[in-house]
Image: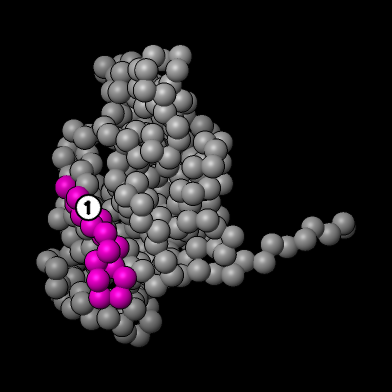
Amino acid sequence: MRLIQFTTESGQRAVGAVVDSNTIDQLKDVETVYQLAQRALASNTGLEILASSLLSDIRLDYQQIIDESRLLSPIDHPQATQLMVAGTGLTHLGSADTRAAMHAQNATGKVEDMTDTMKMFKMGVEGGKPAPGETGVQPEWFYKGDGDCVIPPEASIPSPSFALDAGEEPEIAGIYINDANGTPCRIGFAIGNELSDHVTERQNYLYLAHSKLRHCSFGPELLLGELPKHIEGISRIVRGEEVIWEKSFVSGEDNMSHTIENLEDHHFKYNNFCRPGHVQVHFFGTATLSFGDGIQPQAGDRFEIESPTFGRPLRNTLKVVERVIPKVKTL
């Protein structure tokens, strides 16, 4: 089952189950996926079972929702500061290729001559898929922002004027809610665009943290249940009416150097991320970037990321937003 969030023609929030690429069945007695998840926790009911029991006879036109700009992100939190967006990198087989192009790489193959990027990638390949009961190697980790950094599908995704780049990263995101005891519970998965500033990152690997503090988008559909082991998709950039870059990508554990469970274990081992009622959105990384092919996105370009596994494509237009850096005052 795949779910979306949207607003009705009267302006009320609603949740819908995707019937097909043109049709949505609205759920009754629930306005948000967050409410749905809380009800599932309270009743100890599987999310898909609960959603199926709430299907109404209201059938809606999917495209009309999009055309009227009523599509929302597939998860949010009533308080934006209680939704955290983070992620992990160097998690996919081949993901070091683009990084190596950004950061100088010694070709001797000796560990002592490798960059930190390549050392971490090698660690993941060797220890990112631990045997049951064992602890795998921890991945690269980054913080992206809270709920205010999430942009709905079909909306413009902003890049601050001080940014040196605004490049797409087609990734899968895991969506989680913590129960009353702080135990993380996976709601589902969504396709995402983890927009990053790759030029800033290229200057120095220690600038990675800066490069990730940008907006992002995911959805429009939230996939319930387990993630398939192999996922195929296409990422493209459209400028005007012309596709200026397009490339296929793969994801899922068959194409990763880490298991999803290992990435989750190393995220939720920190108490900060297990606060009851909080939502976590975690990007799992990618191996495909237009930046690696020398593409420089411009304001007005449209990012399109799609995979049959996740239904409708994720589309966002890039815009540059003037950011005046505030001067600190003495209180």
Q: Is residue 90 above or below residue 278?
A: above
* Residue segment shown in magenta: 232-248
**What residue is shown at x 37% (from left), y 45% (from top)?**
283
Residue 230: image quadrant is: top left
Single out the residue that lies furthest toward the bottom: 10
Q: Quadrant of the N terminus?
A: bottom left
Percent across and percent down for residue 192 are 33, 54
| Foreground of the two, 73 or 137 | 137
Provide the residue designation for mark 1: 247
Percent across and percent down for residue 310 are 20, 55
**What residue is shown at x 45% (from left), y 17% (from top)?**
113
Judge whether residue 240 is colored magenta: yes
> Mark 1 is on which residue type?
Lys
Judge whether residue 35 is colored magenta: no
Q: How many marks?
A: 1
Q: Is residue 219 visible?
A: yes
Percent across and percent down for residue 273 are 50, 39
Residue at disc 1, secondary structure? strand
Task: Name the main secondary structure of what is drawn in magenta.
Answer: strand
Single out the residue that lies furthest toward the left: 20
| Foreground of the two, 264 or 121 | 121
**What residue is shown at x 20% (from left), y 64% (from top)?**
312
Q: Is residue 127 visible?
A: no
Q: Is residue 219 above or below residue 46?
A: below
**What residue is shown at x 41% (from left), y 15% (from top)?**
111
Q: Residues within 10 Å of mark 1 (few under 14, many from 20)?
A: few
